[in-house]
Amino acid sequence: MEIPFIDLNAQYKRIAKDVLKNIDRVLSHGRFILGPEVNELEDRLAAYVGTSYCVSCSSGTDALLMSLMALDVHETDVVFTSPFTFMATAEVIALTGAIPVFVDIDPKTYNINPDGLKRAIQAVKNRDNSIYPIPEIILHKEFNLKGIIGVDLFGICAEYREINNIALENHLFVIEDGAQSFGGKYFGKMACSLAHIGCTSFFPAKPLGAYGDGGAIFTDSEELADIMRSIRVHGEGRDKYENIRLGINGRMDTIQAAVLLAKLDIFDEEINKRQEVAQKYSARLDSIPNIKLPNVPEHILSAWAQYCILVEERDELIEFLKGRKIPTNIYYKTPLHLQRAFSYLGYKEGDMGVSEQVSKEILALPMHPYLKDEILDYIVESIFEFYK
């Protein structure tokens, strides 16, 4: 039995005709960069999320970077974020020259802890790491508190009501990193509409994935949307040969937009199927005391980008499942504050205790809308067998 971790082939069989039709249209008109499909996709995505504007781009990473550039983040600034996420979230902060300040996660949702965020802000203001662990450089030099990037991990939106209130009190912007939550909801509002700017990724493995890289930015600010459109084409002005600011090459390929238009037609159905798969996993695994299941607050609809459990015997379970041809993944083995790339910040082991502990036990099981009951049962039965 071959078990894919994410089954993109099953999805393609459903939409192959529409995907090929859309791609053929692009090949026929030849507008491979910012063609009409890009504009159509932006309009549909903005309507889906419920924001005034959507600016498509070349990746989720560029979505975050373009947002920080539009908000004029630079080397004298501090931006707070989670250490328990993919490298891109904090990497873009550093690429602007700003200082990432990490805030530990909530042990239930694995998203940034608002209480820790309050203390981290106070620690930076007072330049006092006895209040909360902060980068060494902040103890010796004054920085501007600029913003917060909240991360919606595994499909669960961060607590933006609290985060936005904290930001308002401290005159900070908030960016929602919705790379894993697109299609999810928070108190009935769509993911990527919960902050000043929302960003998502269309990496193939995401809930809404292209057949290559892609991303999108969402905002209700016309000014920010105009700036980000300029940034994605090298800071263009009236045309691409007038450059009014520094920018990047951040455009989405028209073919990727064509693919996403076909996938968007079935996206709500796939989100519903993800709910069903997750519910089946949780119902079947609930009786194993050695496993901690995902915790989704009642006011949140998860996009279920991943289905992750916590297990103390993770390495042994991985090997056991591998022997049964069951793939698994670890998101994430090393929290960002302990990554070599951020060693210059001076964080040490123990600074983000919850993230460090979760990183030792987290394990992702196969998760996608097309996971058949017999395969899910086989996975669950294998886990039961391991714990006998």
Image (spheres, helix red, strand yellow):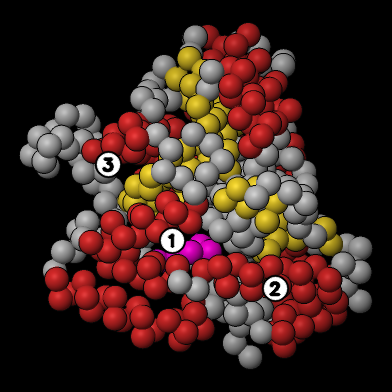
Task: Provide the residue span drawn in magenta.
Answer: 206-211
Quarter location, residue 33 = bottom left
In the image shown, does 323 or 105 lie closer to the viewer?
Answer: 105
Q: Are marks 1 and 2 in contact (CB under 8 Å)?
A: no
| Residue at 56 percent of width and 41 percent of height | 194
Q: Looking at this view, name the residue that lies furthest to the left.
A: 241
Left or right, residue 5 beside residue 216: right
Mark 3 and mark 1: span between their CA atoms? 21 Å
Residue 209 position, x and y percent, is 45, 65
Near-viewer residue (42 or 156): 42
Q: Position of residue 15 (x, y in %)?
A: 43, 81
Q: Disc 2, disc 3: CB below 8 Å? A: no
Spot occupied by residue 242 in the image (x, y as percentages of width and height): 9, 35
Looking at the image, can residue 373 be seen? Answer: yes
On residue 203, the disc is 1
Point out the frontmost of discs 2 and 3.
3
* Spatial CA span between label 2 and label 3: 38 Å
* 121 in the magenta segment: no
Please state which of the two labelled residues, at mark 1 or mark 2, is closer to the viewer.
2
Q: Label for residue 277? A: 2
Q: Which residue is mark 3?
A: 229
Q: Is residue 207 magenta?
A: yes
Count neighbours of disc 2 (C-alpha within 10 A) and say few if under 14, some if 14 to 19, many if 20 or more.
many
Mark in front: 3 vs 1 = 3
Q: What SS does tag 1 mark?
A: loop
Up the image or down, 47 lies above or below 283; here it is above
Which quadrant of the figure contains the C terminus?
bottom right
For image coordinates 26% across by 51% down, the residue present is: 251
Instruction: Point out residue 159 in the picture as x, y percentages from the top left corner.
Output: 67, 39
Residue at the image point whose x is 77% and y is 83% from the top: 377
Q: Main secondary structure of the magenta part?
A: loop
Tell me which amino acid carries mark 2: Val
